[in-house]
C-alpha cells in the first residue's frame, strides 16, 4: 500500500512538472523567440550599423545559450536601404507573417520613427540603438519602443556644454536635411543658447551630397568659433575631410563632432581628427570588461565595435533576460520586466529604462588623440569626463512624451 501511494505521488509530481514546463513553453508564441535585425547593410550608415549590428545581436543570442524558456531563439536580417517605406513594409511582414517578436538596431531616425509606430500598432517591441532622434522619447514615444544607446539631446548636451565652457560660444551648423540631422541641430541649438552661447546660422544640405566645398565657404564666412556637424555616416566623414582641405583645423574655428563613431575616426585618421571633442556611450578600451568583449567582436569583424554594436549586444541580452523573468515573450509583459530590471554589463552600470523608453546610463566626453599619443591600434580617445546618466539625458520634467504624467 505504501509503495502504491509513493508511486502515485511520484507520478502526480511528474505530471505537474511536465504541465508546468508545457505551460511555460506555451507562453513562447509560435514556439520560437524571433529577433529581426533591420539595418543598413549597404548604404551610408552600413559601417556604423550593418553587419556589425547583426554580429553583435547573434553574439548575444549565442552567449545566452540559444534558447529561452526552453525554446529556440532565431535571428533574421534585412536591409531597409534607408527608406522608411521599405522599412515599414518589412516590419509589417515580419510581425504579421514571420512572427517576429522584437526588431533591433533601426539605424536611420526616419526609419526608427516609422518602425516604432508599427511596433505600437502591432504590440511588438522595437529597440533602437543606432538612431538618435530625441523624438523617439518625446512626442513620438510609445510603450513598445526602447531608445537604448544615445540621443540627440545627450550628444549635444555633452559636446556643446564642454566647448562653451572652453570659450567657444558662437556656433554655425552644417546639418544633413533628414530627421536625425534636424533633431541634432535643434537640440544642440537649445543647449548652446541655454548655456550662454549664440547660434549665428545654419545650412541644411541633402544627405549624400557629393561636394561640401560651398558649405564650408559659407560656414567660414560666418566667423563662428564652432562649426557644428549635425550629421553622421559618410556625410560626416566627407565633411571632416573637406574641413581639413579648407584648413579649418589650422584656423581659429573648431569642428564640433556632434555624432562621431570610432569607425569614422579610424577611417579618417588621427592626423585629421586630432583634438576633436565628442560625446559617446561606449569606448572599447575603457574597462577590462569592455576590452574583453570588444576583442571577441574584433575577432569576428576585424574592427573594434562602436557604441551601437555594444548597445545591440547589451539590449538583446536585456531583452532575453526580461523574457526569462516574465515567463513569456508577450510584449507588454516583457517591456514591464525590461523597465523593472537594472542593466549591469560591460556597456552600462546601473542602467535603467524609463517610462518614456529612454535607457539612462552614463555617457563619456572624449578628446581624439594626436597621432603621437596613440600607442596601439584603435587607441584613439582620451577620457575628459564622465557624464552621469541623469545629467546626460533630458529630464522627464521637460518631456513631451504622452506616457509621462506631469
Image (cartoon, rainbow, N blue to C red):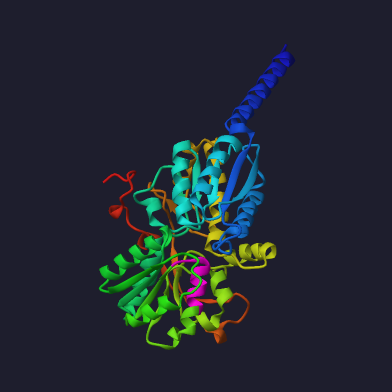
Q: What residue is rendered at 59% in x and 46% in y?
A: 36
**Does residue 299 show up?**
yes
Where residue 206 sits: x, y (%)? 44, 65
Is 256 left, or right, of 286 in this rendering?
Answer: left
Q: Main secondary structure of the magenta part?
A: helix
Is 250 left, or right, of 15 in this rendering?
Answer: left
Work out which quarter of the rendered image holds the N terminus and state it: top right
Q: Is residue 290 magenta?
A: no
**How many numbered marks have been drawn onto this rendered protein structure?**
0
**Does residue 369 show up?**
no
Q: Is residue 167 above or below residue 13?
A: below
Front one among 102 and 375: 102
Please tell me in which quadrant of the rendered image residue 12 appears: top right
Q: What residue is rendered at 30% in x and 77% in y?
A: 170
Where residue 211 sits: x, y (%)? 49, 74
Where residue 197 sits: x, y (%)? 27, 74
Q: Is residue 111 above or below residue 202?
A: above
Q: Is residue 152 above or below residue 159?
A: above
Q: Is residue 237 magenta?
A: yes
Q: What residue is rendered at 28% in x and 53% in y?
A: 397
Front one among 5 and 69: 69
Q: What residue is rendered at 42% in x and 49% in y?
A: 357
Please tell me in which quadrant of the rendered image residue 270 appears: bottom right
> Magenta part of the protein: which range?
231-241
Please tell me in which quadrant of the rendered image residue 329 appears: top right
Where residue 185 sits: x, y (%)? 36, 65
Front one among 307 and 49: 49
Amino acid at each position: 500500500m505504501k509503495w502504491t501511494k509513493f508511486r502515485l505521488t511520484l507520478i502526480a509530481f511528474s505530471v505537474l512538472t511536465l504541465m508546468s514546463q508545457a505551460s511555460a513553453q506555451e507562453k513562447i508564441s509560435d514556439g520560437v523567440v524571433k529577433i529581426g535585425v533591420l539595418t543598413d547593410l549597404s548604404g551610408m550608415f552600413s559601417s556604423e550599423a550593418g553587419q556589425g549590428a547583426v554580429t553583435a545581436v547573434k553574439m548575444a543570442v549565442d552567449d545566452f545559450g540559444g534558447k529561452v524558456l526552453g525554446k529556440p531563439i532565431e535571428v533574421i536580417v534585412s536591409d531597409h536601404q534607408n527608406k522608411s517605406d521599405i522599412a515599414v513594409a518589412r516590419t509589417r511582414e515580419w510581425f504579421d507573417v514571420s512572427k517576429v517578436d522584437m526588431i533591433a538596431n533601426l539605424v536611420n531616425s526616419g526609419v526608427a520613427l516609422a518602425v516604432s509606430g508599427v511596433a505600437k500598432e502591432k504590440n511588438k517591441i522595437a529597440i533602437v540603438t543606432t538612431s538618435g532622434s530625441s523624438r523617439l522619447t518625446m512626442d513620438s514615444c510609445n510603450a513598445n519602443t526602447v531608445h537604448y544607446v544615445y540621443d540627440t539631446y545627450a550628444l549635444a548636451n555633452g559636446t556643446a556644454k564642454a566647448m562653451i565652457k572652453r570659450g567657444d560660444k558662437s556656433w554655425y551648423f552644417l546639418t544633413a536635411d533628414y530627421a536625425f540631422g534636424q533633431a541634432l541641430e535643434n537640440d544642440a541649438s537649445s543647449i548652446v543658447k541655454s548655456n550662454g552661447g549664440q547660434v549665428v546660422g545654419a545650412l541644411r544640405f541633402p544627405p549624400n551630397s557629393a561636394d561640401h566645398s560651398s558649405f564650408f565657404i559659407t560656414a567660414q564666412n560666418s566667423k563662428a568659433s564652432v562649426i557644428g556637424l549635425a550629421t553622421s555616416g559618410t556625410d560626416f566623414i566627407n565633411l571632416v575631410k573637406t574641413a581639413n582641405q579648407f584648413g579649418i583645423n589650422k584656423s581659429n574655428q573648431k569642428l564640433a563632432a556632434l555624432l562621431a563613431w570610432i569607425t569614422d575616426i579610424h577611417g579618417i585618421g588621427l592626423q585629421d581628427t586630432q583634438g576633436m571633442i565628442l560625446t559617446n556611450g561606449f569606448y572599447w578600451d575603457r574597462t577590462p570588461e569592455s576590452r574583453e568583449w570588444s576583442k571577441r567582436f574584433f575577432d569576428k569583424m576585424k574592427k573594434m565595435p562602436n557604441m551601437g554594436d555594444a548597445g545591440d549586444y547589451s539590449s538583446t541580452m536585456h531583452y532575453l533576460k526580461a523574457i526569462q523573468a516574465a515567463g513569456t515573450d508577450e510584449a507588454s509583459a516583457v517591456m514591464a520586466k525590461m523597465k523593472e530590471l537594472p542593466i549591469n554589463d560591460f556597456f552600462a552600470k546601473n542602467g535603467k529604462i524609463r517610462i518614456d523608453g529612454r535607457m539612462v546610463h552614463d555617457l563619456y566626453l572624449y578628446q581624439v588623440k594626436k597621432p603621437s599619443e596613440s600607442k596601439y591600434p584603435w587607441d584613439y580617445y582620451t577620457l575628459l569626463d564622465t557624464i552621469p546618466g541623469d545629467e546626460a539625458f533630458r529630464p522627464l520634467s521637460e518631456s513631451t512624451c504622452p506616457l509621462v504624467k506631469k
